[in-house]
């Protein structure tokens, strides 16, 4: 039984292939088109999934689209009518796309999938999120919580899942949305909505929660169960072209920050304030879900589930014994959820008993490129390289990391979701005081304040971080251990804002944020043996089981997909070398 899942037309379009309940392939369209957060129909991602499964359109039994377009269209029309005539500019901008594309999903699917003759399934948006969270998880039964901007009408939903069925018990409806509230502050502090939320989360530790009480008293009416209503007089997203309005600006005493202008202490304080509000709301929601469902495990998806600081608090402080978060928690993961919903809930197939591990395959679900493909590419383009054996790679790259080189690392199958997990990564020395700023400014060409994640040997994670759970998908934040912390001097403790950046906080300063936290990725030898062997070699030779792992891309571009993408990125940054398959490329030996 072959099932394709598709998400499209909002942001971060994707496609996936599920075969007899097994996840075979999944990828975002942006990786192929090279357009960040590409929302177009995922033609190239779909073609990849068919290729990976050795299928054509006639071999596909079902195609599942991740939401119900007509219900979403109904919500948009009702919203515009409620605000008419205000919002006419937004209406005129949105309608052509709906009339030309979004209302004709079935036609697009049949056209793009090569003589597909099966049935098309349309789960609800939050059903797709819930399915993406529960069915790949290691749990046989669990509660689920999905939080995002908005689907058709729902912005938050929760319920219970067992074996082959998810049951939504309650929802919050548009326009009252935690995801859109967070995006409003993303917009107000000058970052791009639907991609800058990570920046806001990373900026938060530089500020103080000065505006938290103002948010809770003026912008929202928060209940003990985590439900809330927003005061819509402060927001513009229902019918306008911006997230916030003049009332919002008046409440906080200034206009929205212009993108690319200097960050102020106020921006940092706003980031900290909305982050703490988000954590408080999600903890209330989670504990309410526990009380209602009486489940021991929790699964999460939706864009807000990518807030790894909140996730860390849920793991430590909530009533649930364990949690599992879909690595592609945003709309890209809706493609996977729709396909799994079809296999389990629509077709009635039971979930396999997993218990110990999840079914996500490390989220290594994208294209891979053979050594012969890479060799041909390098030779045809006269690119200088040295071929290594698989046995040589770990120690040689560990030595280069220790020598303070920045490494492009291109191996195996591309990751599905927003995180690079050791196959499309840029690597560096976690012990370096300068490496965070070096990679941000000279490699990624992005804001210097943004923290990097540590990749750590799974069995050594407890030696560095206050975490007792595997974290293979980089979705949990934990503090570094007390014995590796470095306390700032009295003078340094007086510093505020971005001046905190240069104070080493631990023996692994490049991956320790200013609040002593880290977004941890644990690495085991089963899911990614070569990456594990590299970190193991670094530990053996240099007595450190932690390296920097950041995504292989520059600001404004998607993570690299192909060897061609990797070489282009390598040559247009100040990376020192590129390890691509078995081939080592040194910048000093390249024709500039």
Image (cartoon, rainbow, N blue to C red):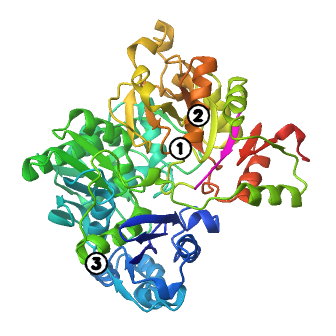
In percent of width and height, residue 132 lies at 33, 61
* Rendered image: mark on residue 75: 3
Q: Is residue 511 above or below residue 40?
A: above
Residue found 28% across the figure and 38% down from its top = 212
Query: Do we see residue 189 in this rendering?
Result: yes
Quarter of image, res 391: top right
Q: Is residue 408 magenta?
A: yes
Residue found 53% across the figure and 21% down from its top = 508
In percent of width and height, residue 427 lies at 63, 36
Q: Which residues are magenta?
A: 405-413
In percent of width and height, residue 519 lies at 44, 36
Residue found 22% across the figure and 74% down from its top = 348
Q: Nearer the viewer, residue 231 or 22?
A: 22
Give the mark nearest the N terminus, 3 or 2: 3
Q: Is residue 476 magenta?
A: no
Residues under numbered marks 3 and 2 in contact, where contact means CB atoms less than 8 Å apart: no
Neighbor class of circle 1 (other Cα within 10 Å; few <14, some 14-19, many 20+) is some
Query: Do we see residue 431 in this rendering?
Result: no
Residue tagged 2? 533
Mark 1 to mark 3: distance in Å?
44 Å
Q: Which mark's residue is nearer the viewer, 3 or 2?
A: 2
Q: Is residue 29 above or below residue 261?
A: below
**Relative to residue 579, is residue 81 drawn left or right?**
left
Residue found 41% across the figure and 52% down from its top = 327
């Amino acid at each position: 039984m072959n099932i394709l899942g598709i998400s499209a037309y909002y942001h971060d379009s994707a496609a996936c292939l599920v075969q007899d309940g097994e996840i075979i392939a999944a990828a975002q369209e942006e990786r192929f088109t090279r357009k960040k957060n590409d929302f177009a129909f995922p033609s190239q991602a779909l073609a990849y999934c068919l290729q990976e499964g050795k299928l054509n359109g006639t071999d596909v039994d079902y195609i599942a689209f991740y939401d119900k377009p007509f219900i979403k269209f109904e919500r948009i029309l009702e919203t515009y009518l409620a605000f008419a005539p205000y919002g006419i500019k937004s209406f005129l901008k949105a309608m052509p796309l709906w009339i030309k594309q979004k209302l004709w999903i079935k036609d697009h699917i049949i056209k793009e999938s090569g003589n597909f003759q099966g049935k098309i399934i349309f789960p609800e948006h939050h059903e797709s999120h819930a399915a993406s969270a529960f069915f790949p998880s290691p749990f046989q039964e669990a509660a689920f919580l999905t939080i995002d901007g908005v689907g058709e009408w729902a912005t938050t939903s929760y319920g219970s899942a067992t074996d082959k069925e998810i049951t939504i018990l309650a929802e919050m409806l548009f326009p009252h949305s935690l995801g859109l509230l967070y995006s409003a502050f993303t917009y107000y502090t000058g970052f791009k909505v639907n991609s800058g939320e990570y920046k806001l989360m990373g900026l938060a530790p530089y500020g103080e929660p000065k505006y938290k009480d103002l948010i809770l008293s003026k912008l929202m009416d928060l209940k003990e169960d985590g439900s809330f209503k927003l005061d819509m007089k402060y927001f513009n997203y229902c019918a306008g072209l911006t997230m916030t309005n003049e009332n919002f600006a008046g409440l906080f005493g200034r206009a929205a920050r212009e993108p690319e202008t200097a960050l102020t202490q106020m921006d940092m304080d706003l980031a900290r304030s909305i982050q703490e509000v988000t954590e408080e709301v999600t903890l209330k929601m989670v504990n309410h879900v526990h009380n209602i469902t009486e489940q021991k495990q929790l699964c999460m998806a939706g864009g807000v589930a990518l807030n790894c600081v909140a996730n860390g608090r849920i793991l430590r402080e909530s009533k649930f014994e364990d949690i599992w978060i879909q690595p592609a928690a945003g709309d890209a993961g809706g493609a996977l959820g729709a396909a799994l919903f079809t296999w389990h809930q629509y077709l009635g197939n039971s979930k396999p008993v997993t218990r110990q591990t999840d079914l996500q395959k490390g989220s290594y679900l994208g294209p891979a490129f053979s050594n012969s493909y890479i060799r041909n590419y390098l030779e045809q383009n006269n690119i200088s390289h040295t071929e290594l054996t698989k046995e040589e790679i770990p120690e040689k790259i560990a030595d280069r990391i220790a020598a303070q080189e920045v490494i492009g690392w291109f191996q195996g199958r591309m990751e599905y979701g927003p995180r690079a997990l050791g196959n499309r990564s840029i690597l560096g020395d976690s012990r370096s005081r300068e490496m965070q700023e070096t990679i941000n400014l000279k490699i990624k060409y992005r804001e210097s304040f943004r923290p990097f994640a540590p990749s750590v040997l799974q069995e050594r994670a407890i030696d560095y971080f206050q975490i007792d759970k595997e974290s293979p998908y980089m979705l949990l934040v934990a503090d570094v251990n007390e014995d590796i912390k470095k306390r700032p001097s009295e003078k340094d403790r007086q510093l505020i804002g971005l001046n905190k950046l240069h104070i080493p906080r631990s023996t692994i300063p490049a991956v320790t944020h200013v609040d002593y936290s880290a977004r941890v990725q644990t690495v085991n030898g089963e899911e990614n043996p070569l990456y594990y062997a590299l970190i193991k070699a670094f530990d053996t030779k240099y007595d450190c089981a932690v390296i920097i792992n950041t995504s292989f891309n520059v600001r404004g571009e998607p993570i690299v997909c192909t060897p061609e993408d990797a070489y282009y990125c390598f040559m247009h940054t100040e990376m020192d070398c590129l390890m691509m398959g078995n081939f080592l490329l040194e910048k000093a030996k390249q024709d500039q």
